């Protein structure tokens, strides 16, 4: 029997396709009562992971558990998990209602359930239309209706916002939030943090098949920091003045300094007090999307293998760049404050980016 918790647990998950390591040692948990975003660039292993969670492919190593059981061992799985990995699999000659009634019949559910889920996804008026004429957004909604047919406790959606217009995305957001507010679990993948930013409570961010962040989105947001970039004739003296005021500084490749967690006035005052001439100063702020790019950038750089992405300061659980531990049954949920020292040191955040500015996809740095 499953434990009924509504929890998804991924432990040491690996999947290789020949020489391709699509998923490497993934560990994360997805908690009930929340919407968790599973985020990463194209090809980062999201769909492969979801397929393993749903028992559609076998892991090379590790495991995925729903309510404490592998998917294949769940009794009445349609009442436990509803999933959409692909919104293309409809018979074009079938109406939306007939399509859904195939499922109610197969699952031994009352026929009215088909109309109920159509209403839930806002497709009641299209119940008798053939799916062949459906727009991409309507297909997404019908796929969602199909996933909901067994009134599942857990919803797993792969890129559900693809093809949705802004109104559709807003609707999806409201739907997922209300689904989670009833204590159920939603795991939703996307390659765009911006798309999911206002929908999800927690995020699991993957890059090149590895987890680079797993935790509370607010905590990731709180890790955004401004830093002051300062050019001076005497950086060593300024570093010492900063140090005496409890601030740290990083030497950037062009010789200027980056001072995190402060503002330009403070740095200017300290420089003045130390008698150091300042030749230029600038404040920089990271937004969430920049952090996302920074964590995931380099996947397609095509060059030599790179080091793992580095976490911003104060973030929750980190993957290869930090002390992420496999979640254990009963472990604290994502968002548990990091232990002292986790992700400390703003200096870790920038160097790769400043030097390489890889990918050109919003990469941070280069302003110093
Ligand atoms: N059946 C397969 N055979 C060979 N390689 C595969 C197979 N499925 C996935 N891959 C490879 O595994 C890697 C991860 O792919 P996956 O589809 O899981 O990524 P993704 O994050 O879902 O990407 P996207 O956002 O583009 O859907 C890619 O390099 C992909 O080419």
Image (cartoon, rainbow, N blue to C red):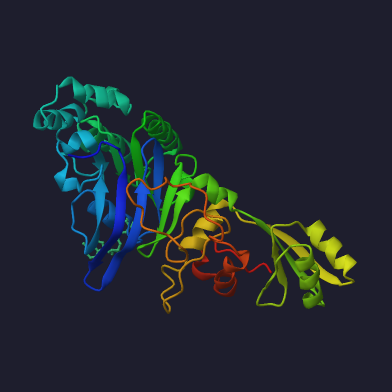
Nearer to me, 202 or 44: 202
* Residue at left offset 53%, top offset 51%: 220
Relative to 184, is 130 on the left or the right?
Answer: left
Relative to 63, is 235 on the left or the right?
Answer: right
* Residue at left offset 23%, top offset 44%: 88
- Tag count: 0
> Which of the 4 quarters of the picture holds residue 30?
top left
The answer to whether residue 86 shows anywhere in this view is no
Q: Locate the N terminus and report the quarter of the image it occupies.
A: top left
The percent position of residue 158, horizontal first and vertical second, equals 31, 47
Q: Locate the C terminus and report the quarter of the image it occupies.
A: bottom right
The percent position of residue 22, horizontal first and vertical second, equals 29, 64
The answer to whether residue 352 shows anywhere in this view is yes
The percent position of residue 149, horizontal first and vertical second, equals 21, 30
* Residue at left offset 37%, top offset 28%: 182
In this view, the residue farthest toward the top is 112
Quick check: which quadrant has ligand 1? bottom left
Relative to 191, is 315 on the left or the right?
Answer: right
Nearer to me, 234 or 240: 240
The percent position of residue 29, horizontal first and vertical second, equals 36, 49
* Residue at left offset 21%, top offset 60%: 59
In this view, the residue farthest toward the bottom is 304
Q: Is residue 106 placed above or below 252 in the rendered structure?
A: above
> Which of the 4 quarters of the picture holds residue 254?
bottom right
> Which of the 4 quarters of the picture holds residue 36?
top left
Q: Is residue 8 placed above or below 133 in the rendered structure?
A: below
């Amino acid at each position: 029997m499953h434990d009924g918790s509504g929890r998804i647990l991924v432990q040491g998950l690996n999947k290789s396709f020949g020489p391709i390591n699509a998923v490497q040692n993934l560990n994360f948990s997805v908690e009930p009562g929340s919407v968790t975003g599973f985020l990463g660039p194209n090809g980062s292993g999201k769909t492969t992971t979801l397929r393993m969670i749903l028992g559609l492919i076998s892991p090379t190593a590790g495991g995925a558990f729903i309510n404490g059981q592998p998917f294949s061992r769940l009794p009445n799985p349609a009442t436990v998990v509803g999933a959409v990995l692909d919104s293309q699999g409809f018979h074009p000659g079938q109406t939306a209602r007939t399509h859904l009634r195939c499922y109610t019949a197969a699952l031994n559910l009352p026929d009215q359930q088909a109309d109920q889920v159509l209403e839930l996804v806002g497709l009641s008026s299209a119940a008798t239309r053939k799916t062949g004429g459906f727009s991409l957004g309507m297909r997404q909604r019908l796929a969602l209706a199909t996933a909901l047919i067994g009134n599942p406790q857990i919803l797993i959606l792969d890129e559900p916002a693809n093809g949705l217009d802004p109104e559709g995305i807003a609707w999806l957001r409201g739907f997922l939030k209300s689904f989670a507010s009833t204590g159920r679990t939603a795991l939703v993948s996307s390659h765009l943090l911006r798309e999911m930013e206002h929908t999800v409570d927690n995020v699991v961010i993957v890059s090149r098949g590895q987890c680079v962040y797993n935790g509370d989105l607010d905590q990731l947001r709180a890790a955004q920091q401004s830093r002051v970039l300062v050019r001076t004739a005497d950086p060593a003296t300024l570093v010492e003045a900063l140090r005496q005021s409890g601030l740290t500084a990083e030497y950037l490749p062009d010789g200027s300094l980056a001072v995190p967690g402060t503002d330009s006035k403070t740095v200017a005052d300290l420089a003045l007090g130390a008698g150091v001439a300042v030749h230029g100063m600038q404040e920089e702020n990271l937004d969430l999307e920049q952090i996302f790019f920074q964590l995931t950038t380099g996947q397609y750089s095509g060059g030599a293998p790179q080091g793992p992405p580095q976490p911003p300061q104060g973030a929750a659980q980190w993957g290869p760049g930090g002390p992420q531990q496999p979640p254990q049954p009963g472990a604290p949920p994502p968002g548990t404050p990091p232990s002292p020292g986790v992700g400390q040191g703003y200096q870790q955040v920038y160097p790769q980016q400043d030097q390489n500015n890889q990918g050109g996809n919003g990469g941070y740095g280069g302003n110093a």
